């Protein structure tokens, strides 16, 4: 300031001379213009002779321009000095508002110098601006802290009384209103180059408003006192201590911020939330602490996992209980740093593999915990499968809140890898049990595969995974998920899901296990059915010769075996798997009876009637417990019984019609087609050639 005064004093005698020179130059310019207008253009030789004179005049004008810029520079310095003196005078008279207005004028001048190129002048102005800012801010801060102390700020514990119990509460509130308003006004004039004392963490999009910064000072001191240095409360194994403490401060202070500070901000036209601003400030303390602790725990799996869990819980409570806006960053972005995220993925996989080993080797791994509660045990999932899917769900809940889809997809890739690993483990156990597919463990493995497949199918339609699916397509993350071009195309069109490949492998395993189970069951039934296949169907007496019909004695072992197996499968398999199993068993049994009993024998009227009785009154009802029309699953046997039990006249007419249709292609309108004739009898599955074979198995034909 003294240097500026000296420059201004020395230059005080210069302006009259400069103004005189400028006036003379202006008169010369006007005279030259009048001369050019009065006389016609001169010859080239004249202008060539005048060129030196013109050059000299140009140099003079350039010198005048330089002097003019110097004068403006000096006037700017003088203006800065005047503003500085005004601020000083206002502070001496405690005219804070006038001082703030003078500082605002400095800030406006600073903005006007941005394009001037006068870097030294601008630096001088900003240093002056920072100087007065600090002085005004320190004075306001001192007064503001006194008022806050009277209002019992900071609120460390839950408030138990009214916020304004004192007798002079109106005066305190007026002072609070004035100081907050002045601090807000002072903050608007900060220059671009922020003082170090007011610098905010990089995670903060915009600086906190100045009153909140001051209110945070005592809380910040408490935080650093307890959670830094050698204090017992600064423990790497207890991040919940400082996370919980900050949440408590946020909750305890919310009423004060909303009732005391927010109305002042609203009257000042500040479009900010006092409560959110305080949370932002406290959150900056947490962010710094979490980042520091996370880098120190990269080589300790247990403590690192604990930190991640606590940070996730903190974020959840911050968004829910404190209603912290989702558009503002919390603490989860700290977990997305490359080293931290990679450590998280590694530990997540390690822990999951260890849990898989434990759950598969547990004593009750293959029994359902809901086996005694019928309405809750529809899927009959063994404990290991349910625990595994719970593990995947917990992983999902952990990474669901991450603000980065790319990071979420990395966790999804880990989940897909774990599912495939678990499928391979199930396959290995299944191969050990495949010698007895009807064993409880084999069926439990089948239930586990079906349970995992069902849950993954549901996840594929979940909104969260559908959003991840679109993110995978838009971000081109097929390498992370191991997807091919075809799969990416299906994902983009929403024809497939993120679990489509895994579902195909699980369905293949389920199909192979079902085939093995049904083949084993059918071999057992076929063994029991051998006497029935070799029964004397040709020599059985007519139905009219028997008072009552009864089940063939040779069919009893087969029927008992079918009944036992259906009951057993119904008890050990999930509902959907049992539906597939009894339908598959019915299909195999239908083919077996048709091939090994019906087509392998000849039947008298009594044999045909006995066969029909055994099927319709004994076999079909065994499956009638699980569907309304079980005969529809035994189409070959049912229709064969219809053909074998036709009366003689109808059988002859049908045989003749079928034989004629084979010999000649008749197209007479009056003759029924073979298909329509068969349909009238209730035969839809068997072809004409099959019906002819069945008719030839009848033994009771009239003598021609």
Image (cartoon, rainbow, N blue to C red):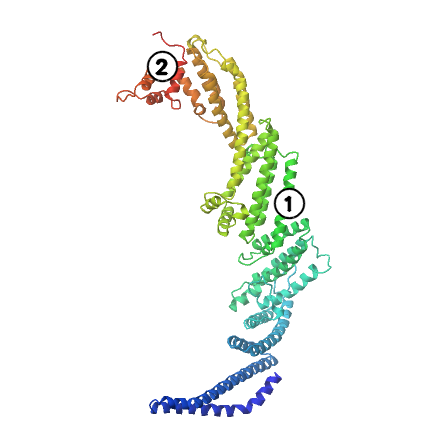
Instruction: Pick the residue in front: 218 or 545.
Output: 545
Residue occupied by mark 2: 651
The N terminus, quarter of image: bottom right
Q: Secondary structure at mark 2?
A: helix
Q: Secondary structure at mark 1?
A: helix
Task: Please tell me in which quadrant of the rendered image residue 179 appears.
Answer: bottom right
- Residue 32 is labelled as none
Look at the image and tell me whether residue 160 can be seen. Answer: no
The residue depicted at 49 percent of the width and 12 percent of the height is: 535
In the depicted structure, whether residue 394 falls above or below residue 130: above
Give the class, few, some or many, for how many residues have Cα within 10 Å of label 1's Cα (few <14, many ≥20). Answer: few
Q: Residue most toward the front? A: 45
Q: Earlier in the sequence, mark 2 or mark 1?
A: 1
Q: How many marks?
A: 2
The residue depicted at 45 percent of the width and 10 percent of the height is: 538
Task: Please tell me in which quadrant of the rendered image residue 384 appears.
Answer: top right
> On the picture, is 652 further left or further right than 109?
left
In the depicted structure, whether residue 141 falls above or below residue 243: below
Proximity of marks 2 and 1: CB atoms separated by less than 8 Å: no
Residue 529 locus on image (x, y percent): 52, 17
Look at the image and tell me whether residue 436 can be seen. Answer: yes
Residue occupied by mark 1: 350
Residue 125 locus on image (x, y percent): 57, 78
Residue 36 locus on image (x, y percent): 36, 90
Residue 357 locus on image (x, y percent): 65, 39
Q: CA distance from mark 2 to mark 1?
A: 73 Å
Instruction: Pick the residue in front: 145 or 355.
Output: 355
Instruction: Pick the residue in front: 561 or 348.
Output: 348
């Amino acid at each position: 300031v003294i240097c500026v005064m000296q420059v201004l004093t020395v230059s005080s005698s210069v302006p009259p001379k400069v103004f005189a020179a400028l006036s003379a130059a202006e008169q010369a310019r006007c005279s030259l213009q009048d001369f050019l207008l009065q006389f016609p253009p001169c010859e080239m030789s004249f202008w060539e002779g005048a060129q030196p004179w013109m050059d000299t005049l140009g140099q003079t004008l350039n010198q005048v321009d330089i002097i003019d810029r110097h004068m403006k520079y000096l006037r700017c310095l003088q203006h800065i000095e005047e503003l500085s003196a005004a601020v000083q005078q206002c502070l001496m008279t405690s005219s804070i508002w006038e001082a703030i207005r003078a500082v605002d004028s400095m800030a406006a001048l600073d903005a006007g110098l941005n394009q001037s190129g006068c870097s030294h002048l601008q630096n001088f102005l900003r240093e002056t601006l920072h100087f007065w800012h600090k002085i005004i801010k320190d004075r306001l801060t001192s007064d503001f802290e006194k008022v806050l102390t009277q209002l019992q700020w900071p609120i460390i514990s839950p408030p138990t009384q009214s916020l304004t119990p004192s007798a002079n509460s109106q005066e305190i509130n007026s002072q609070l209103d004035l100081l907050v308003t002045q601090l807000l006004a002072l903050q608007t004039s900060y220059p671009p180059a922020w003082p170090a004392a007011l610098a905010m963490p990089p995670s903060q999009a915009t600086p906190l408003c100045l009153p909140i910064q001051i209110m945070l000072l005592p809380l910040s001191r408490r935080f650093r006192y307890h959670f830094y240095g050698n204090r017992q409360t600064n423990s790497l194994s207890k991040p919940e201590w400082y996370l919980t403490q900050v949440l408590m401060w946020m909750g305890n202070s919310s009423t004060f911020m909303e009732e005391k500070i927010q109305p002042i901000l609203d009257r000042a036209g500040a479009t900010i939330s006092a409560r959110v601003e305080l949370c932002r400030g406290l959150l900056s303390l947490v962010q710094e602490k979490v980042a520091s602790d996370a880098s120190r725990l990269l080589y300790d799996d247990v403590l690192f996992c604990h930190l991640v869990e606590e940070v996730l819980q903190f974020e959840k409570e911050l968004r829910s209980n404190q209603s912290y806006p989702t558009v503002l960053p919390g603490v989860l972005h700290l977990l997305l740093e490359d080293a931290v995220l990679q450590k998280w993925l590694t530990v997540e996989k390690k822990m999951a593999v260890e849990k898989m080993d434990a759950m598969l080797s547990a004593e009750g791994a293959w029994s359902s915990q809901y086996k005694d509660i019928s309405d809750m045990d529809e899927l009959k999932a063994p404990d290991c499968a349910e625990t595994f899917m719970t593990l995947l769900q917990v992983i999902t809940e952990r990474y669901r809140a991450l603000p980065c889809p790319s990071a979420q997809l990395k966790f999804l890739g880990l989940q897909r890898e774990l599912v495939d690993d678990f499928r391979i483990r199930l396959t290995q156990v299944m191969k050990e049990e495949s010698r007895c597919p009807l064993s409880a463990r084999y069926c439990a493995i089948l239930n586990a595969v079906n349970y995992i497949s069902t849950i993954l199918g549901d996840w594929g339609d979940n909104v969260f995974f559908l959003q991840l699916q679109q993110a995978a397509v838009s971000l081109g993350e097929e390498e992370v998920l191991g997807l091919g071009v075809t799969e990416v195309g299906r994902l983009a069109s929403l024809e497939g899901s993120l679990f489509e490949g895994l579902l195909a492998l699980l369905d293949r395993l389920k199909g192979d296990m079902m085939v093995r189970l049904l083949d084993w069951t059918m071999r057992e039934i076929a063994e029991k059915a051998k006497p029935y296949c070799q029964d004397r169907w040709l020599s059985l007496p007519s139905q009219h010769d028997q008072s009552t019909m009864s089940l063939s004695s040779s069919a009893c072992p087969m029927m008992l075996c079918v009944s036992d197996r259906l009951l057993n499968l119904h008890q050990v398999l999930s509902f959907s798997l049992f539906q597939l199993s009894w339908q598959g068993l019915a299909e195999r049994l239908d083919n077996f009876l048709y091939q090994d009993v019906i087509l392998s024998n000849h039947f008298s009227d009594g044999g045909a009637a006995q066969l029909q009785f055994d099927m319709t009154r004994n076999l079909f009802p065994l499956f009638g417990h699980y569907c309304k029309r079980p005969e529809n699953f035994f189409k070959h046997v049912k229709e064969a019984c219809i053909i074998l039990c036709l009366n003689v006249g109808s059988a002859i007419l049908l045989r003749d019609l079928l034989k004629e249709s084979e010999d000649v292609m008749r197209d007479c309108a009056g003759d029924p087609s073979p298909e329509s004739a068969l349909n009238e009898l209730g035969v839809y599955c068997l072809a004409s050639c099959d019906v002819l074979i069945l008719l030839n198995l009848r033994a009771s034909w009239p003598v021609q």
